[in-house]
Amino acid sequence: MCINWLPLRKLFPSRMLKMTILLRFSLRTLLVAGGLFFFVSNSYSQDKHFTQFNASPLTLNPALTGAMEGTYRVGAIYRDQWRRVLDNPIRTFSLAADLRFEANRRKNSEDAFGLGIMFFNDKVSVIDFSTTQIAISMAYHKALGQDKDQFLTVGLQGGLTQRNVGYGSLNFQDEFNGTTGYTGTTSETLPANNFAFPDLNVGLNYTSKFGTDGRFFAGASLHHIAQPKVSFYEDPTDIRAKPGGKLYRKANLQLSASIPFDRSNRVSMQPRVLAAVQGPHMEINAGTNFRFAMGQYGGSALHFGTWARPVRNDGGFGFDAVVALFGLEVSSMLIGFSYDLNVNALQANQRQGAFELSISYLGNYDNEKVLCPKF
């Protein structure tokens, strides 16, 4: 995974680097926490990251707001990382809902508006560091072509993000009593343990139909346009503050397709690519899902897929993870499960990775229009 962390130099003064984790952590937790602090000291905080990126459309691209085969959609996704290494794994959760309604009631118009709301939370339990965001997005879907089977969409998303660190999970050198443990009080001057900042994202999306049941999807989005400051030692609202501790802009490019294998579209191949660039970091998720319709009318389906994730960090290019995905589609509901297996951990005879669980529901479902990939 492409890791981005808040700089520890910005978070704490230099002599506070001598801090240790509370003795209640196990040895393996202590070792991992040391690794986390190493990453923290050299880069920026972790941005949104889901393997099932199409199952979380409002965190992927604002232009996907209202891009659905119904009139409303409710979805949730949960990610759990490093459970085999940490007593309290890194947890990421998002809940979103969006609506699609007609923009023009003329008979020949398929234009539509999209309106959505999204909640996001990411928590690093080792150092009790969390990011929470709530955002509102809107999009306009313009129908193109004589048959109105193409859509060009522009989307905008604005939100408020809060970051928090719990000092109670940390011990400092001057708290050690010399014999029994860390029972003293630190003399360190600590900043406020939370702050908030506004955030702004924009996106474009294009959807087209080919053949009888084939679909093509392409989108691009730009996140953190204003590059908000994310330092606990700087006021994010103070424009006079010295530059530094900014959140890099992130550019996403996603490509997807649905290619039927037969005329009845009971079996289809669904290739997916997501490329993300943020500062010196780059991540590519590439793979293919296969959809197998079930039942006489194909109202239910099974999804299987495999993925690969190469990344570029400060140390150069590397191969981060391989992914397996399984999905169950039942009428208007879709449930997905995926597991990321870290390649470096596999080479060390460990099974370190992350799993995701997603669920979404489409209201007033119409499978004649496929406006957004499902996984």
Image (cartoon, helix red, strand yellow):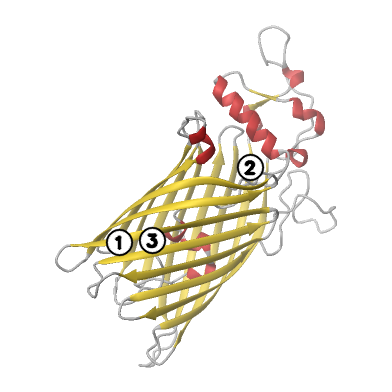
C-alpha distance separating marks 3 and 1: 22 Å
Picture residue at 58% right of the left edge, 32% below the top: 126
Does residue 25 appear anywhere in the picture? no
Residue 132 has which mark?
none
Q: Residue 279 sits in which quadrant?
A: bottom right
Residue type, numbered disc 1: Arg
C-alpha distance separating marks 3 and 2: 27 Å
Looking at the picture, does residue 206 appear above or below residue 306?
Answer: below
Label 2 crowding class (10 Å Cα cut-off): few <14, some 14-19, many 20+? some
Does residue 260 appear anywhere in the picture? yes
The earlier-in-sequence mark between 3 and 2 is 3
Label 3 crowding class (10 Å Cα cut-off): few <14, some 14-19, many 20+? some
C-alpha distance separating marks 1 and 2: 41 Å
Looking at the picture, does residue 142 appear above or below residue 288?
Answer: below
Residues marked 3 and 1 touching at CB (< 8 Å):
no
Picture residue at 45% right of the left edge, 67% below the top: 256
Element carrying mark 3 = strand
Q: Residue 340 sits in which quadrant?
A: top left
Picture residue at 43% right of the left edge, 89% below the top: 145
Residue type, numbered disc 3: Val
Label 1 crowding class (10 Å Cα cut-off): few <14, some 14-19, many 20+? many
Looking at the picture, does residue 55 appear above or below residue 369?
Answer: above
**297 sits to left or right of 82:** left
The earlier-in-sequence mark between 1 and 2 is 2
Q: Where is residue 37 in the image (x, y as percent from the top left)?
A: 67, 34
88 or 306, nearer to the observer? 306
For mark 1, what is the residue? Answer: 291
Residue 164 has which mark?
2
Residue 74 has which mark?
3
151 or 196, nearer to the observer? 151
Q: Position of residue 307 (x, y in %)?
A: 44, 53
Q: In which quarter of the image is the C terminus?
A: bottom left
